[in-house]
Amino acid sequence: MSTAITVRVPRDSAALAVGADAVAATLQAECARRGLALNLVRNGSRGLFWLEPLVEVSTSAGRVAYGPVTPEDVPGLLDAGLLQGAPHALGHGPTEQIPYLAKQERLCFARMGLTDPLSLADYEAHEGWAGLRRALAMPDAAVVDEVLQSGLRGRGGAAFPTGIKWKTVMNTPSAQKYIVCNADEGDSGTYSDRMTMEGDPYMLIEGMTIAALAVGATRGYVYVRSEYPHAIATLNDAIARAEAAGFLGSDVLGSGRAFHLQVRKAAGAYVCGEETALLESLEGKRGIVRAKPPLPAIEGLFGQPTVINNVISFASVPLILARGAAHYRDYGVGRSMGTLPIQLAGNVKRGGLVEKAFGVTLRELLYDFGGGTASGRPIKAVQVGGPLGTYVPESKWDVPLDYEAYAAFGGVVGHGGIVVHDDTADMAKLARYAMEFCAIESCGKCTPCRIGSTRGVEVIDRITANVNRPAQVKLLRDLCDTMLAGSLCAMGGMTPYPVLSALDHYPEDFGLATPDRAAA
């Protein structure tokens, strides 16, 4: 038998959903039938979802990519010289030279697709654990200061400085402190957390361990949404391997310091992506929002000081510790430092993950990376920041994507989710959907969110039915003002964003000849 050729087929959920397992099985069977030696590796996804299942072959010139590959394509690919990286209609040449990848600035996702997600040796060979080892050699306060100086802000959407949160927990005396990872990734069109947990789980484990050692926590939990079974399985496996190898447990890397980490499966409520509702759920209670103060950093899980961060926030930390704060801070613009994994979804030709430094524009993302709409029709609206984000009209597509620039026109960057709509979208229906979504998902604790969203659906229905439309539009705006100012958390406080932006920028979809007031 010939020398085994290494071929990679992703094990990521997105690849599995379009047949990656069947492609891998066919490849193995066909190679065995032909007497070809194959070393099949199930890697993470590169995030080029329109090419999944993306098959990569190791050659002397690097990896060569083919995709999207179906099981029926495999015999023809082998006939054409797949194992030698030969040209084929499904071929894209060297993977790293695919423009979608080559134009990115991958810091957090640098290993994604390169490694076997569960291989500790692979992780370590690609700079894994370097941040933890450096952190163990530093005073705790210096570790926190390094994160603070990096400018890292919460990637879950709130954009609160991560280092300040850690510093508060570090300086709050308590016999027990906790580290909690918010992996309840419920925003429409987002998947960077899932990709991290499935494709590079040790990065998250390392980031949480560094946080624990820095603030004096000994226990941690990853709260993962129930719709992510593959992520939960991969994380549990990775935690067991990391513990067996001494990266977790009672004596982290022989330091004499403990950090025990467990996965907790969420129950499917969108509001549990809000940190205090998440903590309630984690304690075994109904997931409803807590009033603040006290902040979770002071009284969090079980009433103890708790660092609660998003997956990408924790996953950014190992690199910051390994290469220093300045390396990370040099990316980005203004106060938005570092990079953001941006997720392109909806009606877009080339959907997938794009990690870029802050400052990239929406137009670059939509056309240079996304290639326009999948339908081939003009783009009409783009929702940035999840289901409660604003609809961004074309007049704002050249604004640099950063927290402050978006806030200046009423937009939000959120978790980096971008959902594209073509010119067939009815913005009044989408506005109604935002209110309906809030009505269904509201935890019910505060009146503006619980009642306001239900009334919002009714008012939008009257607007579109032209029942005293001018008065109903005014009522809708008043209602949105109440929700914005009076809601207890972002669930009710941000639901008006998509509603008002749709009303301001697409008045014709509400039956208005012109905006009833100047759009932002």
Image (cartoon, helix red, strand yellow):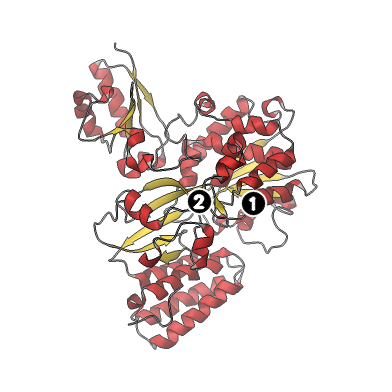
Residue beneath disc 1: 284
Residue 333 picture location, percent across and down: 52, 53
Please state which of residues 86 and 148 is positioned toward the viewer in this rendering.
148
Residue 380 picture location, percent across and down: 32, 65
Q: Is residue 399 above or below residue 227?
A: below
Residue beneath disc 2: 185
Find out whether the residues at labels 2 and 1 contact each other: C-beta distance under 8 Å: no
**Residue found 24% across the figure and 60% down from its top:** 377
Earlier in the chain: of badge 2 and badge 1, it is 2
Please state which of residues 136 and 179 is positioned toward the viewer in this rendering.
136
Q: Can residue 223 be seen at all in this image of the molecule? A: no
Residue 415 picture location, percent across and down: 50, 54
**Residue found 41% across the figure and 83% down from its top:** 516
Q: Amino acid at mark 1?
A: Gly
Question: What is the number of the mark on residue 56?
Answer: none
Residue 431 picture location, percent across and down: 41, 70
Please state which of residues 473 and 143 is positioned toward the viewer in this rendering.
143
Q: Is residue 385 above or below residue 70?
A: below
Q: Residue 465: which quarter of the image?
A: bottom left
**Residue found 50% across the figure and 57% down from its top:** 402
Please state if 197 lies on the left or on the right of 260 as rendered: left
Q: Residue 140: which quarter of the image?
A: top right
Q: Amino acid at mark 2?
A: Glu
CA separation in Å, label 2 and label 1: 19 Å
